[in-house]
Amino acid sequence: MGGSPCQDLSNYKYDRGDVKGLDGKKSSLFYHYIRLLKEIKPKYFLLENVASMQNKWKDLMSEIIGVQPIMINSNLICAAERKRYYWTNIPNVIQPENKNINLKDIVLSANKVEDKYWYNKPFIYNGDDKKVQCTLGIQIHRQGKEVYNLNGKCNTLLCDGNGGNLMKKIFQDGKCRKLTPLEYERLQTLPDNYSDNVSNSRRYTAIGNAWTVAVISHILSFIKL
C-alpha cells in the first residue's frame, strides 16, 4: 500500500507552468512503487494519488499498474474535500456511504480554542449561505484568504505547516480563525491527538500529506479473508 507524492502531478501547479508529472523528482517515486510491487508480489496492492491530474498521467499509471483507479472524494465521510484516485486489485470496491459530515460536526467549541488561532484582521462577509463565508484581509494567495462556513466543508488539506497563514480557516462566533492540528486530524479521520508528539507545523504538514484513514479502511474492508 502506498501513496506516491502528488506535487508534480497536481493541477494546482498548472498556472505556474510547473507540472512535470511522473518526470518530476517527487512523483517519479511512483516507479519505485512499481519496482517494489514486482519484487514483493503482494496478494493485494493499493496506490493513491490526486484526481486533479492530466488524463495522460492517469492513463499511463493505469497502464503500468494494470488496473483502472476508483475515484473517491473523502467529503463523503469527513468535512473536507479530497478527491483521490485509488488503484487496487482488491475486488468490487464501491463508493462509501455519504455520512453528511460538515465542519460544525468536527470543530472545537470556540471557548476551547487558544487565542493564537484567532484573527484580528478585517474581512469581507460573503453571506450566510456561502461555502467561503468570509474573505480574510491578509497578504496571501486567494485560497489562503478563504474562511469556510461551518455548515459546509473546507477545501483539500495540503502541506500547510510552512507558513503562519496557510492553514484552513473557519468563521466561528462572528470571528475568523485557523483550524487547529486536532481539527486537521478529524478532517483526515485520525484519532484525536494522534500526531501531538511533534511541532504543530510538522503536524499540519504530515496530516495534509496523509490518507483519509476512513477511506483506506473502507477499501480494505472489501478484502475477503
Image (cartoon, rainbow, N blue to C red):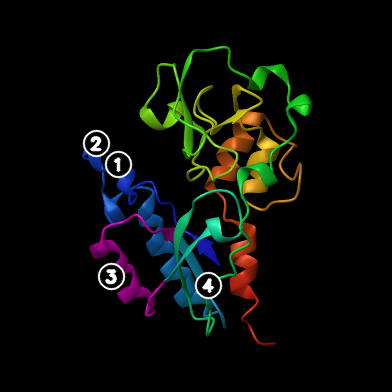
Count how many numbered circles sit on residues in the image.
4
> On the rendered image, what quadrant is the C terminus found in?
bottom right
Disc with the residue nearer the chain's start (1 vs 3): 1
Q: What stretch is highlighted in magenta?
A: 49-69
Residue 179, above or below 77: above
Q: Which residue position is annotated with label 2?
A: 16
The answer to the question of whether label 1 and label 2 lie on touching residues, with beta carbons closer than 8 A, is yes
Residue neighbourhood size for the residue with mark 3, other residues' Cα within 10 Å, grouped as few (<14), some (14–19), many (≥20): some
Tag 3: residue type? Asp
Q: Is residue 62 magenta?
A: yes
Residue neighbourhood size for the residue with mark 1, other residues' Cα within 10 Å, grouped as few (<14), some (14–19), many (≥20) = few
Q: Is residue 198 left or right of residue 148?
A: right
Instruction: Name the amino acid, label 2.
Output: Arg
As measured in the structure, the alpha-carbon distance from the residue carrying label 1 to the one carrying label 3 is: 20 Å
Give me the disc on residue 95: 4
Label 1 sits on residue:
13
Q: Which residue is drawn at 46% across and 38% down?
A: 130
Mark closest to the chain's N terminus, 2 or 3: 2
According to the picture, the residue beneath numbered tag 3 turns out to be 59
Q: Which residue is drawn at 49% across and 53% down?
A: 82
Provide residue 105's location: percent of width, then percent of height.
69, 46
